[in-house]
Image (cartoon, rainbow, N blue to C red):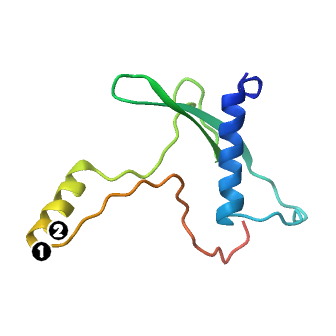
Amino acid sequence: MALQETRWVDSMHEELNQFDKLKVCRLVEFPVRKKALDTRWVFRNKQDDTRVIVRNKARIVVRGFHQLEGLDYTEVYAPVARLEAIRILLEYASYMGFTVYQMNVNTAFLYGEVKEEI
């Protein structure tokens, strides 16, 4: 269904363009006797405080595991800072006289070189 709606297709293109822009991955020849990991698209509507949809977001995720439908099939996990940690950081910055800046991050990737073959 998502492929029939232009707003979701645009969101999917935006995600794939970020991969190219940030040079997250590159295409290589598939190794012999290796199993490929499946991927799937996860679609979310981002809403403001009044529950009005402000943005459609599509993410491609790797399914190197199998989720159970009805239990955790729609779950996508992302590291998020706890509110207590943010408060401690702001209190410490205030105490030390540090300047704190806020910034929006559209896409974040961990830039680590993988030494072993995946």
Question: Of helix, strand and loop, which one carries label 1?
Answer: helix
Question: Of helix, strand and loop, which one carries label 2?
Answer: helix
Number of numbered labels in the structure image? 2
Q: Is residue 89 above or below residue 62?
A: below
Q: Amino acid at mark 1?
A: Met
Q: Is residue 43 left or right of residue 23?
A: left
Specify the label residue 56 is tagged with: none
Q: Amino acid at mark 2?
A: Ala
Specify the label residue 93 is tagged with: 2
**In percent of the image, x 21 and y 69: which residue is there?**
99
Residue 3 on image: x %, y %: 76, 28
State the CA–CA distance, disc 2 to disc 1: 5 Å
Whether residue 44 can be seen here: yes
Q: Is residue 101 above or below residue 98?
A: above
Taking depth in this image into account, of 89 and 68 the one nearest to the observer is: 89
Q: Is residue 89 left or right of residue 118?
A: left
**In percent of the image, x 82 and y 63: which residue is there?**
27
**In percent of the image, x 35 and y 22: which residue is there?**
50
Specify the label residue 96 is tagged with: 1
Q: Is residue 42 above or below residue 105?
A: above
Q: Where's the N terminus, which quadrant?
A: top right
Q: Is residue 109 left or right of residue 92?
A: right
**Can you tell which quarter of the image residue 97 is in?**
bottom left
